[in-house]
Structure formats: structure tokens, C-alpha cells
Image (cartoon, grey):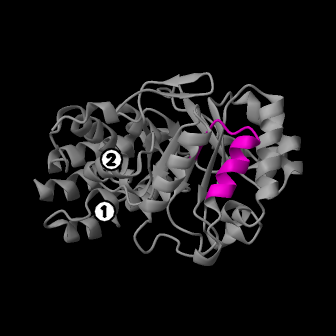
Amino acid sequence: MNNSKLYHPIKIKDVLIDGNLFLAPLAGYTDIPFRTLCKKHGANLTTSEMVSTEGIARGNRKTTELMTRAENEKLFAIQIFTNNLDSLERGFETLLNFNPTIIDINCGCPVPKVVKTGAGSALMRTPEIMASLVNFINKNTEIPVSVKFRTGWDVENENYLDFAKLAIDSGASSICMHARTKTQGYMPTAHWDRLETLTNMVHTQYKDVPVFGSGDLFEPNDGLRMLKETNVDGLMFARGAIGNPCIFDQTKHLLLTGEDIYPSPINQKIELILEQLDLMCLNRSNEELAFTEMRKHCCAYLKGVHGASHVKQLLMKAKNRNDYIEALSLLT
């Protein structure tokens, strides 16, 4: 069955994007090497790891490095997180110097160390702060503003409809909702029915604001179902892209042809692991750090692969590229 109408360009304010399959920001994962592969394999828009506005304002080197785009990222969104307008104002000029295509505000991260500062999904409880951030960016630049949020703080306080209205009325040009509350974290199953309710409201009241869905997008068929069941305009792949940067091409292929080419064959997985490792070696200050950081990605690439348990153990001890090659050769 051809579902080609589900794959289409997206316009966010004055920015035209050639498709509707986006990479969501993921702290510790969506660095330059990983985004490079996702872009190469079909992501229509990629997003930085979340960036602290206080870190930007203070000129923290590690913070500003997060805003550097990869060579193949013609379009690139920067996601910021903060609990106040002051740090955004102080760091705004620096943020603009990195020329983001879109500035995204994180109102969805449930990680305790972020939430306890009043940032991330804590903003679901202080929507007026979110509104001030959106309003400031909208008034001081033509760069589109997007807001990523959750259904609410907990099931007794699901305020996503009012939150979305306030974001859009304050100047947001697109929104994305992860269909869980803060307290639900990443469990249980995402509530896609809330996405459908949100999308129908936005499509009725705000004609030019696209809605993106996130939550439980682990394979191409999940993306197909979300588009059909919720009417969202586009998809934000997060955990489903870790260990499978090809999920964008796979989903596009499914939408355009009806043919499912997921999962990737083991030879392709090995090629991707080594390509990402090489990119990390180029991007990190030393290769030892690259080999260490690559381990978590390898576990994701090899999840569910028959006979991978021993290989994973070897990769945890790998100290150079040859170690990786020798361990991965046991899978072929």
C-alpha cells in the first residue's frame, strides 16, 4: 500500500524543509558524528543536544561546542533549555552567531538534574516562563521558534492543550509533543490519543503551525501508524534512531512504496558502527575517548542481533579500531 501523501515537505515560518522526518535532540547522543549519519541516511532536519542558556551566556566552551553544525547539516536546529529569560537574553547574541535554522525550547526533558533547576519538563508547571522565552526570541529574530513539551507534569495535570495554545500565541512557529507526562518518563506506552487531540485542535485554530509527534517511534511502521492515527504533520525520532540512523530512509521508503526494509542487515550495521567510530575519532580530542563513548552506541546497534552478547563484551574492552573490527567480524 502506498502512503506517499504521508511523506511531504514542511514549512516552518519561512523555512521550507523537504520532508517531515526529523531527528529529536538527545543529550549524550545527538552529537556531530551521530547527526552526520542521520542526515546522510534521510533525516530532513537534525537538532543539537540540548544546550544550557546559562552555559551560552557564560561562554562555556563545552556548551558552545554543542551548537556547531556538521558539514552536511544545511538545516540545523539548536535546542536550548533554561528556567529563566535572563540567561537567554545574556547569551542570545552568541546563540545567533551559530546561525540556527530553528531555535527549539526544551519543555519536555524529565531528567531530575534538569527538572530540579526548573528547566525541561518543569516548565509544564510554569508556562508563563515558556511564553516569555518564545516571545523574546520571536521579537528579536526572524528565526523560527519551536517548542517541545509533554502532555503535562502528571496525569492529574495534563495541560498540553493550553500549553500549546500559549506557545503558539506567544510566537511559536511549530510544536512537538512527546505523548507522556513528566512523571511517566519513558514508561508506560505513549498516549498517542493525546497527540490526535492536540493535532486536531491546532489544525482547527492555527492553520500554519505544524505539529510533530514523539514517543514510541522505534521502527518505520511506528512512524506510519503515528501519522495515520494522530494526523501529526511530522515525526521526531528519538530513541528509535539510536543504533539505527537509517530509520529515516527506511521510514521514507515505507511511506513512498509500502515496502518495509527494516531492520538493517548485519553487514550494514557493522559498516555504520565503523563509520560512526571513525567520525567520533575525528571529532573527539583523543581516540581513547571516542572508543569509550562509542560503546553505548554499539549496544544499541547490536540490540536483538543473534550471537551479539559475546561481541558486546569484547567491544566494551576495545581500545582501537582493530579491536572493533575483530569483535564485529564474529557476527559475519
Q: Which residue is drawn at 76% across and 52% down?
A: 130
Look at the picture and state if 56 lies above or below 6: below
Q: Which residue is drawn at 19% across and 48% down?
A: 262
Secondary structure that dominates the magenta span: helix
Is 34 situated left or right of 318 in this image?
right
The secondary structure type at the circle numbered 1 is helix
Is 31 situated left or right of 331 in this image?
right
Highlighted range, magenta: 161-175
Measured as percent of width and height from the top left, residue 5 is found at 31, 31
Q: Distance between the residues labelled 2 and 1?
A: 40 Å
Look at the picture and state if 151 lies above or below 77: below
Q: Residue furthest left?
A: 332
Which of 308/223 is in front? 223
In this figure, which residue is indicated by the disc labeled 2? 228
Residue 164 belongs to magenta span: yes
The secondary structure type at the circle numbered 2 is helix
Residue type indicated by callout 2: Lys
Measured as percent of width and height from the top left, residue 191 is found at 44, 65
In this figure, which residue is indicated by the disc labeled 1? 315
Per the rendering, the mark at residue 327 is none
Measured as percent of width and height from the top left, residue 28 is found at 53, 56
Is 140 situated left or right of 286 in this image?
right
Query: What is the quadrant of residue 272 in the picture?
Result: top left
**Quarter containing the N terminus:** top left
Which of 312/22 is in front? 22
Q: Residue at x 58, y 33 (%)?
A: 207
Which of 56/43 is in front? 43
Q: Residue at x 44, y 61 (%)?
A: 193
Res 91 seen here:
yes
Is the residue marked by circle 1 packed among few (<14), some (14-19), or many (20+) residues within 10 Å? many
Res 286 seen here:
no
Number of labels in the image equals: 2
